[in-house]
Amino acid sequence: MNAINPPGFADPRPHALVIGAGFGGLAAAIRLGARGYQVTVLEKLDQPGGRASVFRQDGFTFDAGPTIITAPFLLEELWQLAGKRMADDVTLREISPFYRIRFHDGSHLDCSSNPPAMAAEIGRIAPSDVAGYHRFLTLTEEIYQIGFEKLGHVPFGSISDMAKILPDLLRLSGHRSVYALVSRYVRDERVRQALSFHPLLVGGNPFKVSAIYALILHLERRHGVHFAMGGTGALVDGLARLIAHQGNALRLNAEARRICVINGAACGVELTDGSVIDADLVVSDADAAYTYQTLLSEHPRKRWTDRKLTRSRYSMGLFVWYFGTNIQYQTVPHHAIIMGPRYRGLLEDIFERKILADDMSLYLHRPTATDPTLAPAGCDAFYALSPVPHLGAAIDWAERAQAYQTLIAERLEATMLPGLRDHLVTSLAMTPADFASRYRSVLGAGFGLEPVLTQSAWFRPHNRSEEVKNLFLVGAGTHPGAGVPGVLSTARVLDQLIPEAAHYVRA
């Protein structure tokens, strides 16, 4: 193995290697660059973004993953750290309503940050729940202040950090599930679904995850739901340009094989081509379980052993169908959620029984409702996302994918996209098996470890590795967790763990 170091490695600045160019890795690189480090980002794919990469096909542009931006200030802060203005590079468009929830009985609810409009929407389908809805909103604001503003950017490096939050956790019903908490305030099942589905956006079962995740509802209401013109990929490209502006490097088609460790400290990364890049510290934006099971497979581990990781709970898988039509569905909003006939039962099939059910619920994304340039003239771009079991289920996706895609098309035709199959002009799908191979996601899970209480905060893999010195973790698998705001916050935590480059002391 030959050590290959980036140009300028001989300069006195400490060198930080970042594995993975997802939102977490890009944000970490920019923060480290602003703190005086020389940074090299290693990305397996031929483009940055990770789960937020882009597919282009037949004149259509599809965001592969996240499409909802709910905390734009976290992105704006990265541009500020690099001495730039986000508005000069990226245009964010606020979406209102946020999304339309279509229930199985044909009724719907348009969700927005406008309190009178939301009260009117609730009142239209469940008049007796309006007062309870307002009380629930008041509670979610307090949960947000504690769970996001106070704790979302704080590292949980010791059990005492966890002990400090227990009183607030109990007072805010953190021991209950999101659905159980919502059910204390509203009675109509449709309203309960509308106020409790948000944990699915970060890989959690609303009937299992802590009620602390109700903060997502207030996050949307407070900061709005936004879309980047040009697609989420425009944000990724903007972040990549910031790294170049800082004089740092992004290497594509560079997959990490292992993290090199000497005397218990990370000292570089070996790539799959056999080359080695030396570093003073390593930040992994790879799936946390993959980081420990594969990238550190040769290093003895005390906490995140293979046995522990195998016994851990993982988020659901995702089946995502990207497609384009030669007509426009003008009445379909930018974001829509199509609920199936079952809520609790379907989630039990996905998370517990690991059954691929036919009566799926769907998230439907129509970006051309906001940005028509993402499709040829007169056409629409879509993706339909269905939560499914991860690869721990006995599902042969090579055999089942086409039939499942047909079921999704039938559901869309029966609900929001009549005549869909007569107007399809391009199509592509991703299954949990693709998540495993493309993103190195353990079990093909869409969001890494499931965010149940016993796998959150201190119980989650720490931002400063417990196993290896000079190794840090960002991304969905560490604290505070998945979702674009959560992942950006994992990088923000590093500011409290890694000193300014001028104060970094080499071992």
Image: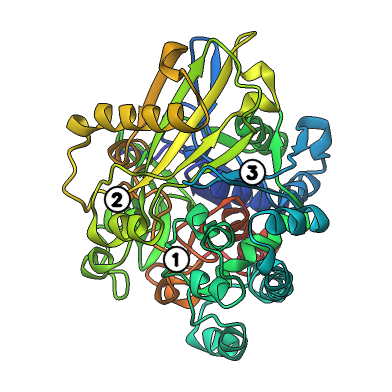
Is 260 on the left or on the right of 137, as rendered? Answer: left
Q: Residue at x 60, y 31 (%)?
A: 233
**Residue located beneath label 1 in the image:** 451
**Residue located beneath label 3 in the image:** 99
Tag 1 or tag 2, which sits nearer the N-term?
A: 2
Q: Give the Cα distance between marks 3 and 1.
A: 24 Å
Out of 429 and 153, give the one closest to the viewer.
429
| Percent position of residue 332, x then y | 62, 29
| Vertical relation: 80 (above or below) 87 | below
Q: Secondary structure at mark 1?
A: loop
Q: Amino acid at mark 1?
A: Pro
Task: Classify 10 Å Cα crowding around label 2: few (below 14), some (14-19), many (20 and above).
Answer: many
Quarter of the image where one finds residue 313:
bottom left
Out of 483 and 334, give the one closest to the viewer.
334
Q: Give the Cα distance between marks 2 and 1.
A: 16 Å
Q: Amino acid at mark 2?
A: Pro
Is 441 on the left or on the right of 476, as rendered? Answer: left
Tag 1 or tag 3, which sits nearer the N-term?
A: 3
**Residue located beneath label 2 in the image:** 389
Q: Residue at x 50, y 83 (%)?
A: 158
| Vertical relation: 254 (above or below) 114 | above
Q: Residue at x 51, y 60 (%)?
A: 199
Q: Amino acid at mark 3?
A: Tyr
| Vertical relation: 23 (above or below) 124 | above
